[in-house]
Amino acid sequence: MGNVPSAVKHCLSYQQLLREHLWIGDSVAGAFEPAQESSQPSGLPEYVKIVEVGPRDGLQNEKIIVPTDIKIEFINQLSQTGLPVIEVTSFVSSRWIPQVAAGATEISVFGAASEPFSRKNINCAIEESMEKFEEVVKSARHMNIPTRGYVSCALGCPYEGNITPQKVTEVSKRLYGMGCYEISLGDTIGVGTPGSMKRMLESVMKEIPPRALAVHCHDTYGQALANILTALQMGINVVDSAVSGLGGCPYAKGASGNVATEDLIYMLNGLGVKTGVNLYKVMEAGDFICKAVNKTTNSKVAQASFNA
Amino acid sequence: MLNCQAVGNGSGLKESWKWPCTGSMNHLLQRSPTPGPWTSISLWPVRNRAAQQEVSTSSVGTFPKRVKIVEVGPRDGLQNEKNIIPTPMKIKLIDMLSEAGLPVIEATSFVSPKWVPQMADHAEVMKGIQKFPGISYPVLTPNFKGFQAAVAAGAKEVAVFGAASELFSKRNINCSIDESVRRFDEILKAARAASIPVRGYVSCVLGCPYEGKISPAKVAEVAKKMYSVGCYEISLGDTIGVGTPGTMKDMLSAVMHEVPVAALAVHCHDTYGQALANTLMALQMGVSVVDSSVAGLGGCPYAHGASGNLATEDLVYMLAGLGVHTGVNLQKLLEAGAFICQALNRRTSSKVAQATCKL
């Protein structure tokens, strides 16, 4: 199996994933007063599935190690919010997949659109990583465990700089072809802008249907929501985000990382796009975890609301 | 066990620190050889000429080829900062912003020091700043007395403030919207006689801290009034930052029936993190003038602890990535931001600055 690590994800809403219509979620009852709803601008999806990566992508990039009981409480709070997907991962060697799979509900594999990033991050070339992922995805499939594929550096790489849309398409197509049900395209260092997002998606969407794509935007340069809006306008309806914008950027000290789930929901609510998520409960979970890790939230919605 | 999403370690990490950090800004910036306020800057990722000129015709929308950035940091930004900045520092900030190539820099406000102590030195600031050719330095003039003082101090352009909300108008400037437009008329007549252009601001275009929802029709009505009395440009302000791209679109659709898009600007606050997305929507609708504030200066007086203006650095980053010409030198802009944050003893609100200057 090799030593290519894979993330084993305990998807708290796996049952929902199996259902055909994931997006008929609970309406947001008693939620924080949404921004005034407008007539939905044409071309936007009616529903967006938010993939909450705070407990995984967020916490792993925070300096403070969070005690297990706090993590559990945090995840429990998030599961009360209506978020359809909450990523909670443990990283294991792929050798352990069969054993871990007994309790796992979903797994992820992490590829990259950049050779140097792939080598530096997971110690192998892109091609080699794909061969190893094939084995992992195959095993997972035998156990009826869905696999999500991630493509890092979709809009730029800290080592290589510019990344061509063609390269992103090539890697995404490989992952989709081997059986990943969804490909999350990550602007790992947040350098993308609406123009580069559009060009990248135009290329990828020639090979992969939009319903199988997600965007994972980092807010390192403040571009995340603008990039996400562009992706929505192009037909993408799955967006990754992290409550409180947890997680810094390991490549730019002091910079921010993930886009904040609260700010994303605020925008989607205002656009009249359904999410099934209670913004106020997300803010409460965000408040809880920020106090626990002793940091101020990166969510502007939270900053404006809790201090008002 | 390796963590796929973790930072590369050892030598990999060290190498990555070279970029995009300050030490190698050359990787991010490529300045064209011609100096001057409208010098074309190409930002990472470096694109070819054709890509820079592109105007998308897909469903995602078209963008203007050029955007005029109106820098409101020295006025809107500073007036909402707690710490009073000494006059020489204000002058230096404005001079640094001029060096950065911003075509319009709102220098100060001729308002009573009783109301806005930060702007008490308005005459000294106007007299002390370097006036670069090709750059405008408008000043706020809330009333006729302020207008006269502004002209005496050498102002060549002024701005007046209206609101799309009756309650906000009454609480902010002590009179109804209609009365405020009558007062502006007095200023506009005098300005016309002195060949001084007047910019009109409309506050609360996407929501009001007192009234809540604001109808697009009301915004269109006020914008039309201000345009018809002679304001050459109307800046539509999301004063409390509650807007989202949908409400921005609806509001602009209504206003564009009454005022030509070439005469419109957007002034988005980032209180709820929506400013750049809202600005993007406005650009897609044809707006080509955007207000912003270096370092995202200025908090929100209606939400304690919340942020205020859209940061100019983050706006420039997006526009450069879109291949839209602004004439702004991002490196020099970052320096101006670093300078004023140090003077104010506060952290920048610009994410681009945080990522590149470790501020």
Image: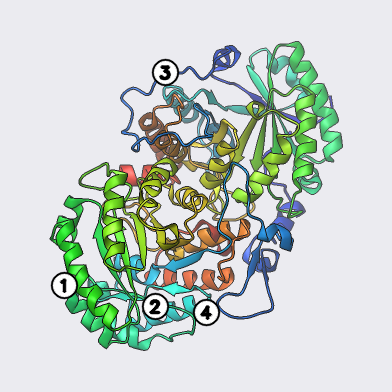
Ranked by sequence position, the earlier of labels 1 and 2 is 1
Nearer-the-camera pick, A180 or B348:
A180
Chain to which the residue tagged by mark 4 belongs:
B
Mark 1 vs mark 4, CA separation in Å: 32 Å
Question: Is residue A307 shown to the viewer in this render?
Answer: no
Name the image colouring. Answer: rainbow
Q: What residue did someone put label 1 on?
A: B114
Chain to which the residue tagged by mark 3 belongs:
A
Mark 3 vs mark 4, CA separation in Å: 54 Å
State the residue at coordinates (39%, 63%): B297
At mark 2, the secondary structure is: loop
State the residue at coordinates (70%, 45%): A153
Q: Position of residue A91 (x, y in %)?
A: 67, 29
Question: Is residue B284 shown to the viewer in this render?
Answer: yes
Left or right of B6, for residue B189: left
| Pointers 3 and 1 in contact (C-beta within 8 Å) | no
At mark 3, the secondary structure is: loop
Other residues around mark 3 within 10 Å, as few (<14) / some (14–19) / many (≥20): some
Q: What residue did someone put label 3 on?
A: A26
- Rendered image: mark on residue B99: 4
At mark 4, the secondary structure is: helix
